[in-house]
Amino acid sequence: MATIDDLRKTRLKKLKAIAKAGLLAFPTQTKRTHKISEALEDFTTLSRKKREVVLVGRIKSQRVHGGATFLNIEDGTGKIQAFLRKNRLGERGYQFFLENFDVGDFIEIKGILFKTKKGEKTIDASDFKLLTKSLRPLPEKWHGLKDVEERYRKRYLDLIFSPEVKKKFVLRSKITKELRSFLEKEGFVEVETPILQPIYGGARARPFKTHLNALNIDLYLRISPELYLKRLLVGGFEKVYEIGKCFRNEGIDKFHNPDFTMLEFYWAFADYKDMMRLTERLFNHVLKNVLGTLHIKYQGKKINFKSPWPRIDFSQMLKKYTKINIEEIDRNALAKKAKNLGISIEKERPKAEIADEIYKKFCRPKITQPTFIIHHPLGFQPLAKALEKDPKKLSTFQLVVGGIEFINAFSELNDPLEQRKRFKEQEKLFKSGLREAQRLDEDYLEALEYGMPPAAGFGMGIDRLVVMLTDSDSLREVILFPTMRPKK
């Protein structure tokens, strides 16, 4: 049985034969007149008038019957059958095709459209031209791959053989487009902020560190654009948003990838309650314009996005499923309780974050329908404003659907003195060994001292949203080139 290396050597010989015949194996131009989808859509008119068309595509299959050959060719819009015959192309031309063209090659075909006796729409080739010579054969049993990771490593092959995979990424593009459309209609301005930052902030995460030779300084890949977007509120913008890559040097699992796409937006003179109502409208817009419905299925669960959605206090949720009263228990007792529940807690982790770890394991998986979890305990989010009527709680919310956290949002802390106090507390945690703690950013504090209006902020991982709306199993299914462990 021929190996891939043997087949590659054979194709290299064909490449030489093509060059010897004075033809280009990788020409620059094509005279395509129609996309395949256009030819199929206008098939009746084109075939009746016997109008000659030029189609292009990759050869996906080939069947030879003596003096006639049937091909299936496919471009980015569709596929069609092509009919090549010796008595029309001439013996030399037909034989040249058989000897030098392979499945996987890109080809240009000129001809007239017709239907076969079986009713299949076909182009009757009067001429052909090689557009790209493929040097490796396409895998024959790609659909049956047991090593799913190989599909992610070689996404280009996954896209060739799996139309449903390609559809997910087309849908992803539509989702992002509708997010932008909604925000722009609401008056938000799209901006770009630095990916390389002198100090990282805006989230609890470990960063990637790099070095800028030109200035001889260390920089970090951003874990969030938050602090720069809020600097723009100081500068006079009232509604800003950014869609872009963020990077966190953490574990990889179904819902985490080291680089991911984040949507963050900030709204001056609004609070977290305004933001919840806006979030409901945003999802209504995206689902109706992308899927045409507010009812979806995700991993066997029926989910209804019709608003308004429930608002449930974090402490109530924790008490309901674990019997823990977060307002009465101290940090050490809570850490002991977490240990008894099988949750490993670092000695440096503060009370609010321990409560969050317990919530993630015992509460969040119970939430199927869209639900806002509100009012996390003080200490959970150093950048969030405390509730005026209950300063031990924060003006925060998370959107949870199908057991997955999609959104973190809150009324933004704009008191520079309180923010400095929170940053210093985080610095102590960092120095004690909690590497995910946020860092003290003097430049951001200086910006706050010039005055930032009251505002609400919103952060959502777009990858997770696409996972749910495409009913996918993990982020790897909806990130074109997910991070993979290198092969040995």
Image (spheres, rainbow, N blue to C red):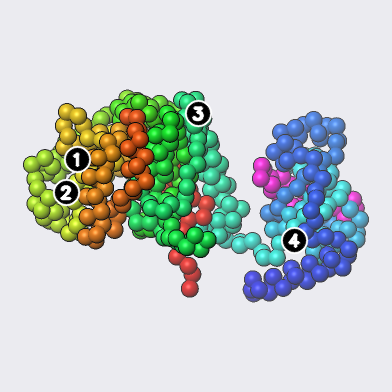
Mark nearest the camera among 1 and 4 is 1
Find the distance from the CA under tag 2 to the CA under tag 1.
9 Å
Mark nearest the camera among 2 and 4 is 2
Q: Secondary structure at mark 4?
A: loop
Q: Looking at the image, do the residues carrying marks 4 and 3 touch, with CB atoms under 8 Å apart?
A: no
Residue type, label 4: Lys
Mark nearest the camera among 4 and 3 is 3
- Image: magenta residue range: 70-88
Q: Is residue 7 above or below residue 173?
A: below
Find the distance from the CA under tag 4 to the CA under tag 3.
45 Å
Q: Quadrant of residue 364?
A: top left
- The image shows residue 95 at horizontal and vertical percentages of 86, 62
Q: Secondary structure at mark 1?
A: loop
Image quarter of the N terminus: bottom right
Q: Looking at the image, do the residues carrying marks 2 and 1 touch, with CB atoms under 8 Å apart?
A: yes
Mark 3 or mark 2: whose residue is earlier in sequence: 3
Which residue is painted at 80% across and 50% down in the image? Answer: 29
Characterize the local packing of mark 2: few (<14), some (14-19) or many (20 or more) Cα atoms within 10 angstroms: many
Q: Is residue 249 left or right of residue 382?
A: right
Q: Looking at the image, do the residues carrying marks 3 and 1 touch, with CB atoms under 8 Å apart?
A: no
Find the distance from the CA under tag 1 to the CA under tag 4.
62 Å
Question: Residue 133 shows which numbered tag?
Answer: 4
The residue that label 3 is drawn on is 184
149 or 218, which is in the foreground?
Answer: 218
Which residue is painted at 79% across and 44% down in the image? Answer: 32
The residue that label 2 is drawn on is 351
Which residue is painted at 47% across and 63% down in the image? Answer: 216
Question: Residue 377 shows which numbered tag?
Answer: 1
Q: Is residue 420 left or right of residue 75?
A: left
